Image: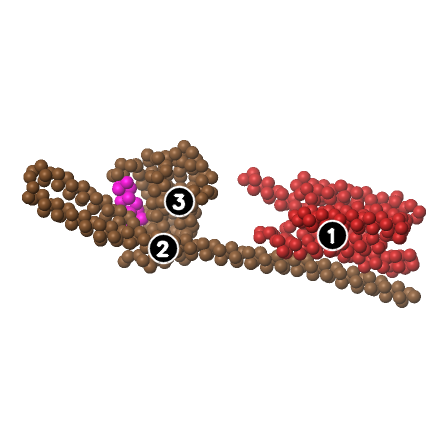
Chain colours: A brown, B red
Amino acid sequence: MLFKDEEIILLIIAGTAIVMLLGVFIVSFLLVYQKKQNKNVLEKEQLKSSFQQELLKTRMEIQEETLNHISRELHDNITQVLSFVKLNLGVLGRNLGENEKTRINDNRELIAQSISDLRNLSKSLSFEHISVMGLVKTLEIEAERVNRSGILNLSLLIEGDPYGLGEQRELVLFRIFQEALNNVLKYAQADNFKMSLYYKAQMFNLTIEDDGIGFEPELLKDKGGSGLRNIVNRAALIGAEAIINSSPGNGCRINLSLNPLVQETYANGTYSNSPG
Amino acid sequence: MLDSIYFYFELFAFFVCLYTYKKLDRNFKVFLPFLAFIVIYEFANLKYWTLWHHTNAWCSNLESIIEIIIYTRFISALDKRKQYRKNVRIVLFIIVLFSFIDMIFIQGFFMLNTIAMVIQYSVLTVLVCLYYFNLMDNVDENLDIIRYPPFWATAGILFYALAFIFYHVAYSYMAYKQNYQFFLLAQVIPNIACLILYSLLSVAFIYQYKKASSINVIKTL
């Protein structure tokens, strides 16, 4: 009888140990499963992020190709036609009276002005010119062009010794400037547009400010602020962080900073359609 | 001292719950009155104040019913499915009803209701397994399970229930035969089960407290 009781006790001990081990197995299984799940989610996020990067990069390549095409058309076709028109008007003016001659000359000057504007526009659209002249020079030309138009007072401040950030980065920074300028001209009703470039040893900083009507910060989250989101996305593409601050009546401030020593893989490539 | 070590763990879990109470989830707050009751009940047991007709089995029977109600409601509250919670409530009602039937008609008021207890612990085990299954199925993408308080609390309940199943299956047969070895086992198994349960509950409270604190820090930032 005693032996039987001992057997039962052994059974209780063994049974309890087995079910406890089962419990350990269940808990361990859940932990391992969760760990794997988290790893999968992380990989999925990384894939999604790289896909988004690739998508953005492709979009920018297409955009650059289009802009280059327009730039070439403006330079090689329209400005040539306008030059021809100007030349013809000059020839035509020789056989006319003094009064008509003056009017013809006025028109020739207008055409010359248009040719010059178109050439400048062509330069600002073309990757090649930005690449050859560099970011600072291109921005100076743009500032001069905008100021000459009288629509806006654009001031450009450069601190530190300018250094090359790489063709891709400079192009993206220039496109960000264009996007910001476009926003200001379209919506901000601003009188002044200030752009500052800070070149430090381990940090490049770009600040774009305007004194326009500003906007609700919620606009950044809305679908309506696609131009602003473009700025953030473009900045991310070159490994920079863009911070946009604005409130109604207080204008807008875009701050962008990047480490020039850290080269992003995509920032080293060149666009296949880039002239030159 | 060693044979009542489980009491110190209950006391420890109670104080941890008391300390973290303000930052506990609504679902976890029920543990404070429950642990207070457990501490008082075990203290009364240790002092033999619950002896009636030379037994405290009547008291254990009632305590196990309260235990199953608290744990079942806690586990079901972790699930968002209304129908599931409703089903669990029905199961709970049946178990409690059966426990009273066992107490009154089957094993008696002054005997330990081991049949009801085995069923109670089995149901708790199933509920925890179902919860884990659901957790695997509808897992939150950013869930860090190691720091997830319900995981630790349910793990404690799971081990507690598993440890008691075999013990209670053999209890009726062995205890009333006055087997010495079984009395030794009766000291060890509940001690280990309570030790695991209350330490894991304490871990759950601490993680809940840390989680609430970190959320507060983010809010103030």
Look at the image and tell me in which quarter the N terminus of chain A lies.
Answer: bottom right
What residue would you read off at disc 1?
Answer: B157
What residue would you read off at disc 3?
Answer: A227
Mark 1 vs mark 2: in front: 2
Q: Are marks 2 and 3 in contact (CB under 8 Å)?
A: no
What residue would you read off at disc 2?
Answer: A61
Q: Is residue A275 visible?
A: yes
For mark 1, give the secondary structure: helix
Q: B40 or A218, which lies in front?
A: A218
Amino acid bearing label 1? Ile
Specify the farthest residue to the bottom.
A3
Mark 1 vs mark 3: in front: 3
Magenta stretch, residue numbers = A132-146
* Cα distance between the residues tagged 1 and 3: 55 Å
Q: In the rendering, which numbered label is found on residue A240?
A: none
Q: Are marks 1 and 2 in contact (CB under 8 Å)?
A: no
Discs 1 and 2 carry the same chain letter: no
Residue A190 screen position, x and y as percent: 34, 35
